[in-house]
Amino acid sequence: MGLSYTEYARALHWRPNKRVLMLKVYFDDSGRDEQIVGGCLADEQVWAIVDHRWGLVLRDYKLQWFHAVDFEDGQHKDYAHLTRPEKDALFNELLDALSESIGLPKRAGGFWGAYICGVVPADSVETLRGIAGNDRRSRKREPQPRNRRERWTEDVVALHHDPYCVALGLCFRTVLDECGVSQENPVHVLVADQPNRKSRIDFVYSMAVTIERWSRLLSGISNGPEMRPRDIRPLQAADFVAYYLGKSVRSPKDLKAAAAATTMKPVFIRAARGLGVTDGWHR
């Protein structure tokens, strides 16, 4: 078992007002191929509250952890002991655990936070996959990169063909340009473990810190096997946000997704306008 969120934050000596962004990826589960990255931005003291309250809710429903796709699967063993009314109550209590601490302050000096969801639509995902396939076939006929700069260029091209990285870049732009982040209180990013994409996630982050207006707004990234949602409950919250906000875009009549989208205020849902990781980064 890995470190809990509280243990991890303590190890990094985070101040109570340290801003932390939790992100989770979602591939569309509805039979289409949208790519979604979403999560929450909040101060460390807020995440500590959410972490504790989330754990209490899970305990009350005899759950080890929460995973939205499994929860929505009517036959998943982890939730088989819950009746339909109990599952509805669980959803509402988890939504309350988030919305009562993260969002517009409910009083002067109250807690603050934001919900972020970057969506790459299905047609864009298909286009990117086609471009990536053509690029791979083309590179097979060409000589291998001869130096570091040529390898770097290949890596950048690959990033721009990856729908996940496009959605991640969209989330970075939204957080850093629209969510009131300041250099006095820069953001630390936690990304739920994606073993096959770790190097690309790190690459996108390294590109973001080179943007002049963002260079002092980012204080680090945690991205690797220690970022397991089973251990770090706030990443389960990011999972909840990514799943239901993404679903509210593609299935607006879904009752749970609509409730989540209505309750999470403010909600930043952005669909990719272009097909690049850095779309909108440069001004």
Image (cartoon, rainbow, N blue to C red):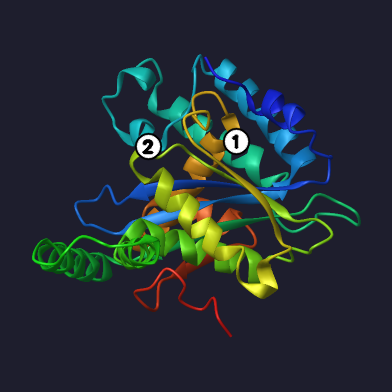
Q: Is residue 277 above or below residue 75?
A: below
- In the rendered image, which quarter is residue 107 located in? bottom right
Residue occupying image coordinates x 48% and y 35%: 224
Q: Secondary structure at mark 1?
A: helix
Q: Position of residue 47 (x, y in %)?
A: 70, 38
- In the rendered image, which quarter is residue 179 located in? bottom right
Residue 29 in view (yes/no): yes
Give me the C-alpha separation between circle 1 and circle 2.
19 Å
Q: Position of residue 173 (x, y in %)?
A: 56, 68
Q: Position of residue 71 (x, y in %)?
A: 38, 31
- Mark seen at residue 81: none
Q: Is residue 68 above or below residue 63?
A: below
On the picture, is 232 further left or further right than 243? right
In terms of sequence position, does the residue under pointer 1 or pointer 2 come before the other? 2
Q: Amino acid at mark 1?
A: Pro
Q: Nearer the viewer, residue 253 or 49?
A: 49
Q: Nearer the viewer, residue 138 or 201?
A: 138
Q: Position of residue 89 (x, y in %)?
A: 52, 31
Quadrant including the C terminus = bottom right
Q: Secondary structure at mark 2?
A: helix
Residue occupying image coordinates x 72% and y 32%: 9
Q: Nearer the viewer, residue 220 or 267?
A: 220
Residue under label 2, please give it.
195
Q: Is residue 205 above or below residue 12?
A: below
Residue under label 1, please give it.
234
Q: Amino acid at mark 2?
A: Pro
* Residue lying at the far bottom of the rendered structure: 283
